[in-house]
Image (spheres, coloured by chain):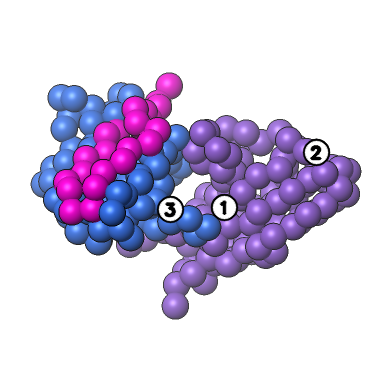
Amino acid sequence: EAQVTQNPRYLITVTGKKLTVTCSQNMNHEYMSWYRQDPGLGLRQIYYSMNVEVTDKGDVPEGYKVSRKEKRNFPLILESPSPNQTSLYFCASMGPPEYEQYFGPGTRLTVT
Amino acid sequence: AQSVTQPDIHITVSEGASLELRCNYSYGATPYLFWYVQSPGQGLQLLLKYFSGDTLVQGIKGFEAEFKRSQSSFNLRKPSVHWSDAAEYFCAVGLNRDDKIIFGKGTRLHILP
């Protein structure tokens, strides 16, 4: 079954404690992306990757890092989380032939 | 810069009534257009997409959308809504088929019994 998985699904942490949210897809897609969703703001892109070792900033990259060492994985790293990063995070991947974004189930992060 | 506008934050319709959700975009070229649905506590699911060809696109769950270049719009319609359609709907636009897409802020649909 084609899918995008994210872990953890829920995370409560404290300010400044480094964390990583993993994302993995099994569709051999080249394009992967991270979004955050906040009430009234829709989905905003954090980072995206067009292929292995190719990443670029989206609209709200401050405070986040990503890496793309393998095609299937695209982890999101928060080196020093702050309360304004409390949000719902989605990973997505896209590729031929459909060229539509497949979304993971989401990770709800709370930073206290 | 490209942008996507969903003018209605909330819409309430009665079960069985017709539905139209509005989406307008600002883009220089012919865009790639998408509608996604997010049920409460769920991820996003693609309802339909438009890349080229027939401007009336059929999607899943009985939804359709029409691309109108002259109005820069891609409105979503359904002839008769069901209680299970209560969700948040997002319009999205991309410049290229395999590149980033920009999402609107969403329209939350409420269904009256």
Q: Kindly identify the residue that appears in the image at 36 percent across and 52 percent down.
A: B86
Is A67 in front, or is A105?
A: A105
Q: What residue type is labelled 1?
A: Phe
Circle 2 chain: A
The residue at which mark 3 appears reads as B38
The residue at which mark 2 appears reads as A82
Earlier-in-chain disc, 1 versus 2: 2
Up the image or down, A54 lies above or below A83; here it is below
Q: Kindly identify the residue that appears in the image at 86 percent across and 43 percent down.
A: A15
Q: How crowded is mark 3: few (under 14 residues within 10 Å), some or many (20 or more)?
A: some
Quarter of the image with the N terminus of chain B is top left
The residue at which mark 1 appears reads as A90
| Picture colour for chain A | purple
Q: Tag 2's secondary structure?
A: loop
Q: Kindly identify the residue that appears in the image at 55 percent across and 38 percent down.
A: A39
Q: Which of marks 2 and 3 is in front?
A: 3
CA–CA distance in space, label 2 to label 3: 27 Å
Circle 3 chain: B
Marks 3 and 1 belong to one chain: no
Q: Which chain comes out blue in the rendered image?
A: B
> Would residue A68 be counted in the magenta stretch?
no
- Residues at circles 2 and 3 in contact by the CB criterion of under 8 Å: no
Q: Tag 3's secondary structure?
A: strand
Up the image or down, B47 lies above or below B13; here it is below
Provide the residue span drawn in magenta. Answer: B1-23
Q: Kindly identify the residue that appears in the image at 31 percent across and 41 percent down.
A: B12
Marks 1 and 2 belong to one chain: yes
Q: Estimate the x, y position of residue B18 in percent, counting from the top left.
A: 17, 46
CA–CA distance in space, label 1 to label 2: 18 Å
Q: Which amino acid does label 3 sit on?
A: Gln
Q: Estimate the x, y position of residue A38 in percent, counting from the top left.
A: 58, 39
> Would residue B9 be counted in the magenta stretch?
yes
